[in-house]
Image (cartoon, rainbow, N blue to C red):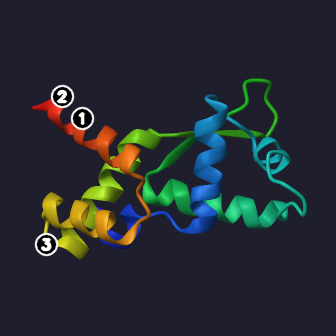
């Protein structure tokens, strides 16, 4: 099943949950996820709703606790690196005509890049070639 553009992109709230799951490195219950939020913490129902959305979008899955209680543990189906690569491909395609050159030019023109950083980037690109 091919996901549409909206389903391939995480909202800010969804990204917060994904970052918690990625940083944790193990499956987490809803209560454990909420505990990782800074104060004021979101409501249980809010986090549960976003977990359902992430599951429908195919970003996470869950398993039931083995002890026989009704606790579910959620885990990512995509790594942070995989999502970042997918997201940046979408940005490159949508905003820069699928041109890496145009995208890099944009960042070089619009970001404050020190000469040291620019030199390091050029060296990194040169080593790749």
Can residue 35 be spotted in the picture? yes
Q: Quadrant of residue 64?
A: top right
Q: Depth check: give the residue in front, 62 or 120.
A: 120
Mark closest to the chain's N terminus, 3 or 2: 3
- Residue neighbourhood size for the residue with mark 1, other residues' Cα within 10 Å, grouped as few (<14), some (14–19), many (≥20): few
Tell me whether the residue at label 2 lies in contact with that at label 1, contact meaning CB atoms closer than 8 angstroms: yes
The tag on residue 127 is 2
* Residue ID for mark 3: 97
Question: Outermost residue toward the front?
Answer: 115
* Residue ID for mark 1: 123
State which quarter of the image contains the N terminus. Answer: bottom left
Tell us which disc is closer to us: 3 or 2: 2
Q: Position of residue 128 (x, y in %)?
A: 16, 31
Tell me whether the residue at label 3 lies in contact with that at label 1, contact meaning CB atoms closer than 8 angstroms: no
Q: Compared to 65, does 85 lie above or below?
A: below
Q: Is residue 43 left or right of residue 111?
A: right
Name the element at disc 2. Answer: helix
- Residue neighbourhood size for the residue with mark 3, other residues' Cα within 10 Å, grouped as few (<14), some (14–19), many (≥20): few
- The residue at the point 39 percent across, 49 percent down is 84
Q: Compared to 65, does 34 lie above or below?
A: below
Name the element at disc 3. Answer: loop
Question: Outermost residue toward the right?
Answer: 40
Q: Quadrant of residue 125?
A: top left
Question: Outermost residue toward the top?
Answer: 67
Q: Compared to 12, does 86 lie above or below?
A: above
Q: Position of residue 17 (x, y in %)?
A: 64, 53
State which quarter of the image contains the C terminus. Answer: top left
Measure the alpha-carbon separation of dots 3 and 2.
26 Å
Q: Position of residue 98 (x, y in %)?
A: 14, 65
Q: Position of residue 34 (x, y in %)?
A: 81, 51
């Amino acid at each position: 099943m091919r996901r549409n553009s909206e389903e391939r992109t995480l909202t800010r709230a969804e990204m917060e949950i994904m970052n918690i799951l990625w940083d944790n490195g193990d499956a987490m219950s809803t209560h454990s996820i909420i505990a990782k939020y800074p104060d004021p913490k979101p409501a249980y129902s809010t986090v549960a709703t976003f977990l359902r959305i992430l599951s429908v979008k195919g970003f996470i899955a869950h398993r039931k606790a083995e002890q026989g209680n009704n606790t579910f543990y959620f885990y990512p189906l995509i790594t942070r690196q995989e999502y970042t690569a997918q997201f940046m491909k979408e940005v490159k395609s949508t905003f820069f005509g699928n041109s890496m050159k145009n995208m890099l030019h944009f960042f070089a023109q619009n970001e404050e890049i020190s000469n040291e950083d620019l030199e390091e980037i050029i060296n990194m690109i040169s080593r790749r070639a």
